[in-house]
Image (spheres, helix red, strand yellow):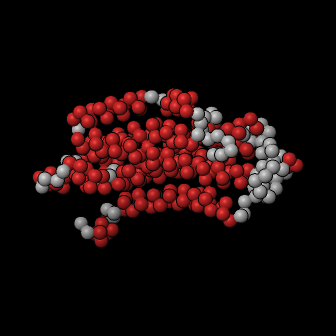
Amino acid sequence: MSQLELERTGAGTPRRARRTSVFWLALPIALVAVAVFLLPLTGLLPAAGQDLDATRQPPGFLAGGSWSHPLGTDKLGQDLFTQFIEAGRLTIMIGLVGAIVAIGPGTLLGLLAGYFRGWVDRVISVLIDAQLALPFILVALAIIANRGSSLPVLFLVLALTGWAVCARVTRSATMVIRERQFVLGLRAAGASELRIVFRHILPNLGGTIVALGTLQVGTAILIESALSFLGLGVVPPMNSWGSLLAAGQDELSTAWWIAFFPGFAVTVLVLLVNLLGDALLTNYDPRKRRR
């Protein structure tokens, strides 16, 4: 059936609806990322220094607040909006790098397990099950207690706690693709196994990998925020939304806005990223499209 016939019969409507949902979910995430990375370059952010005459000042839209500090100030009189933007930049960067370090080994192992099957599949499947059975907080505590808190250690934690989910999904998708006619034809033509895996099957997993990477961004942000809230993630002088949330937890009764805005930002961003990842996975996974 041609595209014109699909449009006339309405058969193309679900696909257009999926693409529309992906666009409207990606738009606010893109706007947040642009604001976080470009605002510091404009010179419009309030000064980041201390002002002991303006401690715990409420946001500008509340009584007693000032629009010179749109999100208020902390106990040292530091502008929260400036901290919020700078911390958001680090949070998003951690989410992106955390997704990459998890999706890389996860995709490779899932690809090998799904294509070669046999003992390779059994060994990798045992590793996946073992990793998924371990609570991430125990893995994080063990690594951080041994190596200390730093960004490289945080990325190591994100890689070790995120690769298994990516490997499991990639393995399932690879098992479907390896039985397709073009793969059977390549085998009959004498193409090497590695060529089939990396030149033909891997590109066909592109959509699934992008969707998994998007989901992993949200997971990495959530894990980093949880670890930073416990004092195990980002350490001063750097700030993330998780560390800002931790810094404001003792001020909830007197200056709730210190913890509210970073906590709200983490919640909304992770929700949008997860919805976007689910929409992308639905768009690229034939089994979910049928459902």
Q: Residue at x 68, y 51 (%)?
A: 84
Q: Is residue 162 visible?
A: yes
Q: As drawn, which residue projects farthest toward the front?
A: 147
Viewed as shown, does residue 145 lie left or right of 126? right
Q: Residue 4: name its quadrant.
A: bottom left
Residue 136 percent location from the top left of the image? 49, 32
Residue 128 percent location from the top left of the image? 36, 34
Residue 43 percent location from the top left of the image? 71, 64
Viewed as shown, does residue 82 lie left or right of 150? right
Q: As drawn, which residue projects farthest toward the left?
A: 188
Seen from the viewer's position, the closer of residues 141 and 137 is 141
Seen from the viewer's position, the closer of residues 64 and 246 is 246
Residue 273 percent location from the top left of the image? 51, 50
Q: Residue at x 75, y 53 (%)?
A: 48
**Quarter of the N terminus within the rendering:** bottom left
Viewed as shown, does residue 151 lie left or right of 279? right
Q: Residue at x 34, y 45 (%)?
A: 108
Q: Give the answer, above or below, for where 104 lies relative to 230.
A: below
Q: How many marks?
A: 0
Q: Residue at x 45, y 61 (%)?
A: 20
Q: Is residue 291 visible?
A: no
Q: As drawn, which residue projects farthest toward the right?
A: 53
Seen from the viewer's position, the closer of residues 175 and 124 is 124
Q: Residue 252: name its quadrant.
A: top right
